[in-house]
Image (cartoon, rainbow, N blue to C red):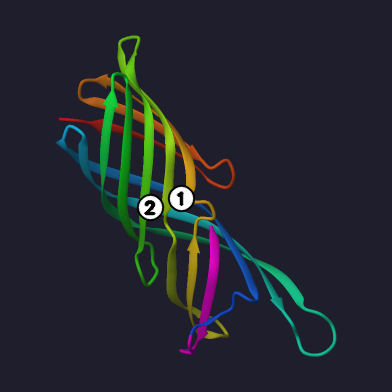
Amino acid sequence: MDVRDLRIGIDGAPLTSVSDFVDLGSRSHVNVGLGRLDMFLFPFLNLYTLLGYVHNESSTKGNVTVDPPGPGGPISFPFSAETELDGFVGGFGMTVAGGYKQLFVALDANWTQTDIGFDDEFRAVVASLRTGWNGKIQGTPVRLWTGGAYWDTATTARATVQVPGTGSVAFEADQGPANPWNMVFGGQATFHENIDLFLETGTNFDDMKYFAFGLTFRF
């Protein structure tokens, strides 16, 4: 995660950018459990809602550079902070799909919002395009796919905290993924006419990777 700008105000003072003095970056580990209720409005259009819980563990590292008065050059010192955040997440989305013989293409987009303790809720839009093969392996219906996804999760985190010896500190941090694009690879198998199991993994071959699995019961 890149922190593109950080603004701080102490004891009610106007928020002032400190990005000229502080260089920040964050690495996050996120676990999400989701329930999804969906409906095929048309054979090619699926609509769904999402509700779940998110747990975020972040490690933020930074470097502060100040230029003190008097002789000598700037002084730099590093710092780090560990945080844990929890909250509920909800949203909705849609999938549009089409195919020819055993090949298919699916476009998915969803909007979610979560409250993990900041002044404003975090909102995100994730869009993905998948193409793959739909057939059978030893009599079991199977779908295999690959594609790409874009994570529009950039947002501004706002909060006010009490810092011992300093007082009330308000901050705003403009942050988002360093690389919002990633590849996806996955598969789905139908073990019963009503039960599907899917597995998917994604990566940008640099600083992001995810793993997802799920069980679907369809009426």
135 and 112: which one is in front?
135
Kind of residue sitting beneath label 1: Val
Residue 14 is tagged as: none
**Percent x, y of residue 48:** 22, 44
Q: Which residue is mark 1?
A: 30
**Percent x, y of residue 94:** 25, 44
Locate residue 114: give its quadrant: bottom left
In the image, what residue occupies the spot 35% across and 53% down?
125
Say whether disc 2 or disc 1 marks the residue closer to the N-terminus. 1
Part of the protein shown in magenta? 1-14
In the image, what residue occupies the spot 54% across and 71% down?
5
Q: Residues within 10 Å of mark 1 (few under 14, many from 20)?
A: some
SS state under label 2: strand
Residue 54 is tagged as: 2
**Percent x, y of residue 67:** 74, 82
Q: How far apart are the alpha carbons under marks 2 and 1?
A: 7 Å
Locate residue 106: give its quadrant: top left
Most common secondary structure along the magenta stretch: strand
In the image, what residue occupies the spot 48% across and 68% down?
174
As drawn, the residue found furthest toward the top would be 138
**On the picture, is 177 further left or further right than 81?**
left
Locate residue 212: give its quadrant: top left
Q: Tell whether label 1 touches label 2 (CB within 8 Å).
A: yes
Above-or-below relation of 211 to 144:
below
